[in-house]
Image: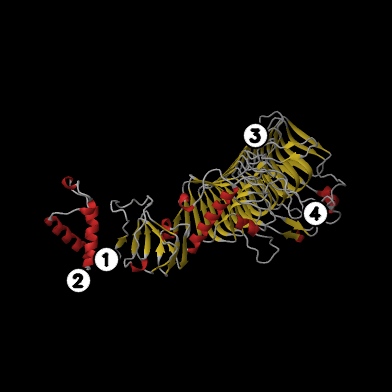
Amino acid sequence: MRINFLYLSYHIQFYKRHLVLPNNLKHHTQTNIQLPMKLNIYFSLFMLIFITSCTSDEVEQFEITDKNSTHLNLKQFSNRTCRQFDLSLIKKSRFLLNCIMDLKGETVNVPSHLRLIYDGGQIINGTLVFSPGATIDSHLLSPSLTLEGSPTLNNGVFELVPFRWGIIEGITTDVNAQKNKEILQKIIDMIKKTNGHTLKIDKLDAYFKVGGINLSPKQYSENSIHLPSDFTLEMTNNTFIRMQPTHFPYANLMSTYDVDNVTIRGGNLVGDRYKHDYSDILDINGISRKSHEWPTLLITKGSRNVRFENVHMSQSTGDGFVAGSAGFRIKQNTPLNKKVLLIGCTITDCRRNGISITDGEDITIENNIIEHTGEGEAIRDSSGKRIYDAAGVAPRFGLDIEPYVSYGNFAKSSEIRYEWVENVKVINNRFTNNKAGSIIVYKADNVLVDNNFSDAVIALNDTSNSTISNNTLEARPDFKSIGLSSGDERRYVNFKGGAMQQYAVNNTIVGNTVRGFSIAIIVNGSGGEVYHNRVYNYSYMGLKVDRVEDTNIHDNQYTSSSSNSQGILLTRYANNVNIYNETFTIKSGFIDSHRCNIYNSSFKDTRIRDNISSFKVRIYNNVVNARKLGRLTNSSGIELSNNDMTF
């Protein structure tokens, strides 16, 4: 057995200095203790056994210059300077540093076997060159330390201590807010460079300067706090990332752009809605951007497998969360959003929309709270023009799904999808106090809206193969108009000749509970089905059928004690529509139909105009308890049979 007696002697002296002494020896100074001979012998034998039994993985701890200091707690930060030493001479695999190592501008090599462990210390003012295999704890890093070679972060995790990195908290200047963003981005980039994967932020309340005008989608992302692939940002309830008040009409506070496998969890993202400068600003083409409606708190563009969890977003000048495009799809190799998950988040008090989805596939919006979107009444000048301020700006929905689509002519086949949205799940969310409505799907394919709570309208527009199911809708006092709407027909005012096409096809409304609206359910489009819904306490109409084809409506219940509550409204045209096995308990008329399926020269679709006399609506096997049958005037093709009606 080989014993390093020099090493043994060093450690004996070290432990003498840190030895807990009996009370009768405490008047001696620890640095000059003279132990009794017998105790010295026992102590030396103990250290001999201890040293010779150590393994090659023994931890070596560097001693600080203050001889009276004891071992620092891992949560403490040392302000003491290390003695001079050479990292390359350390033989052990793990090295605990509990002092400040000032490299004084020098470059130091870190051998491949060495793992640098934080124990209260830090390394400053120089460069570390890492051999492959060498690692370092995040708390040892500093703004004045440069990493080269093959640095690797221990456990892949960086825990941010804001003051050590120069982040200025609280209300501050634009210059400081810009520096804050640059510092945080430098840390994110450094974590990636050191083969790390996670940034953890706890207590932080700081402003970050972002935004601009006339930038590309990629440039707006680069201007924001942006995350790389294979990365996790973990924040807590104590983390507040705030947008520095700005005049820019475009800004992204935090973003992912063309990346894979990113998670953002926790924290508070706060916009500048109530401190924004809303004065007019022109873009590079001289177009006014005075509405200032585009700043976003969290946006993903062209990214795959991204997850946003338990993030609190508030006071955006524009939207809270956006799944948007990295560029138009007509350009080859444009990256697309795929597998996006927004879960457990709260999005509140945003000026435009809570959530906007303009491009992406396989997107899930689950277990979120979306509230108080677009509130505030606009003010106008003496001529009636709007003066833009913090008041809500259109569309003002909780969730707006609206890709940019154009048409070369009036045929569906000429559709040009600059952006597109498909395969979306909106499940188990709560939508309240969103000014214009809870959910609007202007255009998309295969959207599921299931098991949500809403106090305003949920609507599909030019949308196909989509389902609204098992939702609870309860009208709030200031929103009584429409509960559910299944779609609309694409209309061209100047279209002459040819056959118009239904763009809302194969949509389903099933299993919903709807309370307190003026009109409970509106059915449009083609190839749809509406069934097993429960409608209560509506003030005007339980079911409105408008421009509908090839649709079945059945097994729904409508109950209202309102004196004006009616059953079915038929308007414009309906063809091959079956309404059956319905139950109506209402206080006014069962049917209201005026000029339904009657020739109208204003119809631009020749297919409808020339064949409307053969259109049929079949109403049968329904149970009706109403005050009267209602109105059937100047209408055609409406057939009633086998209905159990009590007036």
For mark 2, give the secondary structure. loop
Residue placed most toward the observer, 358 or 414: 358
State which tag comes first along the sequence, 3 or 2: 2
Q: Which sits earlier in the primary sequence, circle 1 or circle 3?
A: 1
Residue 92 appears in the rendering: yes
The residue positioned farthest toward the left in the image shown: 38
Identify the residue position indicated by label 3 in the image: 516
* Residue placed furthest toward the top: 563
Asked if disc 3 and disc 2 are in contact, CB closer than 8 Å, the reply is no
Give the number of the mark in front: 1 or 4.
1
Name the amino acid type tagged 1. Answer: Thr
Say which element carries label 1: loop
Residue at which label 4 appears: 500
Q: Amino acid at mark 3?
A: Gly
Report the amino acid beneath label 2.
Met
Front tag of 1 and 2: 2
